[in-house]
Amino acid sequence: MPINKVTKGAISSAIEELLLTCSFTKVTVKDIADTCGISRNTFYYHFQDKYELMDWIFMEDLAENVKNYDDPDKLADTFLAICRFMLKRRNLYYPFLQYNGQNSLQERLTEFYYELWLLKINMQYANSGLKLRDNELEVYARMNAHALVGLICDWVNNGMRNDYTQYLDEVYSIIYLQGELHSAMLECRLNMKEKSPQSNTLNGAEVS
């Protein structure tokens, strides 16, 4: 394993140890460096701050534990896999997710799901000959991303126990409702074409 990754792994172990007795908000870079036995300069060589460290830990766990995590058709599977590895490292992720300020893991999760929903919705509409305006696409993707992250936050606020599968029905409901919205838009498109073949827009969607 490259020395760079070994050092990053040691730094991540240090913050995990600190979070056993301290909140993420109170942990400092000095605390992490001292616990790891490195200088602050060495820490800053690898990470800009503790928030970048948190983001690196999440992305490493994501890549290691979630197959096809960037596949928009695997949203439900990804949700379960993320909860599973977070529970496995509960001592780390519980304090991470209790912090909800700037550069929080909640923000990172929202951006992660936002990108997946952008892909999913865009493909869904394109396959039907519909193209949403950029602002409409962003609203739908952001709304659904917040819904999924909200479920994870509910799970954390309820104790982050081994019961995350109970939220799966709600995940499927979010996916189902997006599908229903797409179906309604498609039906309106067909009706619009029958009434006015020259029309090329519909409720924020361009039609071909």
Image: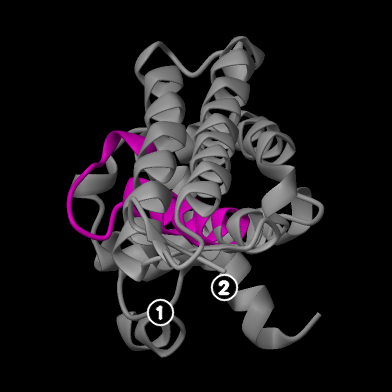
Quadrant location, the C terminus? bottom right
Using the rendered view, name the quadrant where residue 41 is placed.
bottom left
Q: Marks 1 and 2, Cα distance to the nearest angstrom?
A: 9 Å
Rate crowding at label 1 as few (under 14), some (14 to 19) or many (20 or more) other CA atoms within 10 Å.
some
Spot occupied by residue 120 in the image (x, y as percentages of width and height): 61, 54
Residue located beneath label 2 in the image: 8
User: Which mark, residue 152?
Assistant: none
- Depth check, front residue: 203 or 73: 203
Using the rendered view, name the quadrant where residue 138 is placed.
bottom left
Residue at 43%, 13% (x, y): give it.
159
Question: Does residue 105 show up?
Answer: no
Residue located beneath label 1 in the image: 47
Spot occupied by residue 188 in the image (x, y as percentages of width and height): 49, 41
- Depth check, front residue: 176 or 44: 176
Residue 19 is covered by the magenta coloring: no
Instruction: Give the residue type that dot 2 points to.
Output: Lys
Rate crowding at label 2 as few (under 14), some (14 to 19) or many (20 or more) other CA atoms within 10 Å.
some
Q: Secondary structure at mark 1?
A: loop
Residue 101 is covered by the magenta coloring: yes
Q: Secondary structure at mark 2?
A: helix
Question: Does residue 40 show up?
Answer: yes
159 relative to 126, above or below: above
Instruction: Give the residue type that dot 1 points to.
Output: Phe
Quadrant location, the N terminus? bottom right
Residue span colored magenta: 97-121
Residue at 40%, 33% (x, y): give it.
147
Residue at 36%, 69% (x, y): give it.
134
